[in-house]
Image (cartoon, coloured by chain):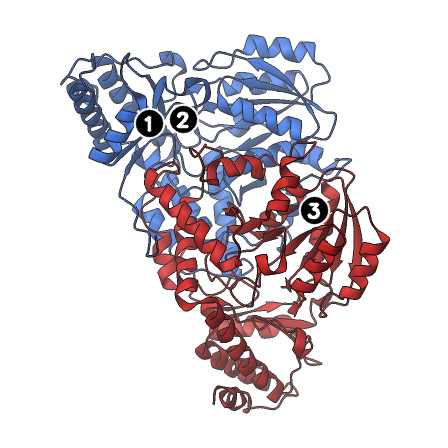
Chain colours: A red, B blue
Amino acid sequence: MTGPFNPPVRTLMGPGPSDVNPRILEALSRPTIGHLDPAFIGLMDSIKELLQYAFQTQNRLTLPVSAPGSAGMEACFVNLLEPGDTVVVCQNGVFGGRMKENVERCGATAVMVQDDWGKAVDPTKVEEALKANPQAKVLAFVHAETSTGARSDAKTLCALAKQYDCLSIVDTVTSLGGIEVDVDGWGADAIYSGTQKCLSCVPGISPVTFSERAIEVIKARKNKVQSWFLDMDLVMGYWGGESKRAYHHTAPINALYALHESLLILKEEGLQAAWERHDLHHRALAAGLEAMGLSLVVAPEERLPQLNSVSIPDGVDDATVRQQLLANYSLEIGAGLGALAGKVWRIGLMGFACNRKNVLFCLGALDSTLTAMGADINSGVAVNAANKVYG
Amino acid sequence: MTGPFNPPVRTLMGPGPSDVNPRILEALSRPTIGHLDPAFIGLMDSIKELLQYAFQTQNRLTLPVSAPGSAGMEACFVNLLEPGDTVVVCQNGVFGGRMKENVERCGATAVMVQDDWGKAVDPTKVEEALKANPQAKVLAFVHAETSTGARSDAKTLCALAKQYDCLSIVDTVTSLGGIEVDVDGWGADAIYSGTQKCLSCVPGISPVTFSERAIEVIKARKNKVQSWFLDMDLVMGYWGGESKRAYHHTAPINALYALHESLLILKEEGLQAAWERHDLHHRALAAGLEAMGLSLVVAPEERLPQLNSVSIPDGVDDATVRQQLLANYSLEIGAGLGALAGKVWRIGLMGFACNRKNVLFCLGALDSTLTAMGADINSGVAVNAANKVYG
């Protein structure tokens, strides 16, 4: 390839990135300014306030990490953990496993609480693990498991962490903006998210927020944070806002323009309205899929509206269907990940991509593709079933 | 701030970010696609090839780290070092000090070789340190010190590393695209750079490249890399190109569109032409500054054309001048950093910003600003002196 790259125009209904609002792409391409420009300081303040709104927190240490969600996860672990610490890690999908990797790479010990993939984290098991491990410093769990579509009860889990004198680390990569995230209400301590899910921003940035309790732990560390780049004590010198901004690293200026625009869009809609929109379109999509005879992996009460794992019907080849959707409809849905690879599709309804047009389009495309392949489904009924939900 | 952020249009002649070519801003805002989209795989291959061209290397492990240059630096250190290792670190400015931080946070020992800020690294001192520390595993140095504008002799230093059986880690954040970077010719082992300097791309990505010797060291590690996000063994699974791309983290899709466009622009111009352009405009700028009576910090034979540190004349207030340039000309020049804070300005001529218009504009603005403040300079001669260089 020696010429410019002209990407195909997709409909992104996988596990993220999701369709990006054109307002955000336009903001992204505004003229670059310096990371110490006085005009940029105002933008930073505004981003911080909007993130506090999105996370529902007053935490002063609320900022976007200059790298994707995986780095946000790492920021939470490397800042709170020191060698020899113990962490109770809940795993009910891929991302709990990644948390374990993070814990161990900090020289700490992960006590794993395993739940079936596709189910919520079981608070009873978590309490047992916390009781059995009084030395535990942190409870870590994924609020919205992107690999399965299961939603865990963050409020209950954070309360358990507090009860057993643990800090909580919460993955809200896929939840933020799609379902309720209530950092202060939960009393969560270190939370990270991503931009490319229900914020419908471009990928590459990870919003994080730390409670006062977490900041105290960071300030009282015996050892330096093992990552210089992610050292919150240093990052705070640039994002802190209380004194002169000290250069730490060059902020990803244009990506922050985009994040700001995406947060403005969320604020304009309002959190409650955004959650209701995700719920509505999820119900329509689920009705359509079920009318077709497909089944969702997650039980209704634990489903994430923004990430729908659908069991692949017997005899249907996973990759062929996804390739045909891409080739014939320029529609991306997600493959299964980890233990669910080849067994499910993951249909995202995230942020800007969560709308009636996409629901009907996706159902229509899937119906037609599966029918043409001779799959054992109820053809021609999915779109109607979805429309009934819309009323 | 509750509305959209409309950045001022600046001329960026600081230490980076530099002015971004509009082609790159346009590429940045193209429609987002998925990080596992077949169309994206083609883009990844193309970026890899173009980076190999820019770095002048055949290294197969050549890729953009999904975070700024500081994370690229960290990627080099955390992948090559294990606890207990010794690294000879050359320091002649801010970034050598950051290398020391990285070494120590890996549980390794840094043996420092200090040179004056504004001077190149002295190979004689480096050889003494390598002789005195036969246990050293790595020699680390900054090719182009962004904090001072000094250029070190990478070829000689990499050869010393080899001679003393060390790997070399080389910071080319400010050099890549502005002066010769010859990774294979030098025999360098781990090299990182940034996008927002002489590539004139938006900040946020760090191109890196690792030699086969470095890959062997990574493959033979006793301990896991302390950063999951920056673990090259895992990142290779996504960027490797030899087998199926395995999901590691969500790539910053749009930032990679921009990087691709910036590398295309560099290839179109050609490396040699780009270096000559930086040299020409540097000479014009230097002639103008010297005619004005200002002096450059770095000796001519060690100067980086793309980063000109100028001593602030006696009695002139650093911040006032920079504020006036910003307010009256929308022109950003850089402040001094670390030991040089308050003593120098750093005038960048990087990538797209390195052109005749900017040289004349900057000299004119500085001349007028300093004259109006009653500074003891030769007024009204700078632009002519620069024009004489252009002939």
Q: Which residue occupies the foreground of this view, A193 or A346?
A: A193
Label of residue B278 in the image: 1
| Residues indicated by labels 3 and 2 sit on the same polypeptide chain | no
The image quadrant of residue B226 is top right
Residues packed near mark 1 inside 10 Å, few (<14), some (14 to 19) or many (20 plus): many
Farthest-out residue, right: A132
Amino acid marked by disc 1:
His
Q: Is residue A22 left or right of residue A250?
A: left
What is the distance, in whole Å, between disc 1 and disc 3 at their CAs?
Answer: 43 Å
**Residue visible at 64% across and 85% down?**
A375
* Residue B371 to residue A176: above or below: above
Residues packed near mark 3 inside 10 Å, few (<14), some (14 to 19) or many (20 plus): many
- Residue identified by numbered label 3: A102
Q: Secondary structure at mark 2?
A: loop
Q: Which residue occupies the foreground of this view, B375 or B160?
A: B375
**Residue visible at 63% across and 64% down?**
A144
Amino acid marked by disc 3:
Asn
* Labels 1 and 2: the sequence-earlier one: 2
Q: Chain of mark 1?
A: B
Q: Which residue occupies the foreground of this view, B217 or B106?
A: B106
Asked if labels 2 and 1 touch by Cβ distance under 8 angstroms, the answer is yes
Q: Secondary structure at mark 3?
A: helix
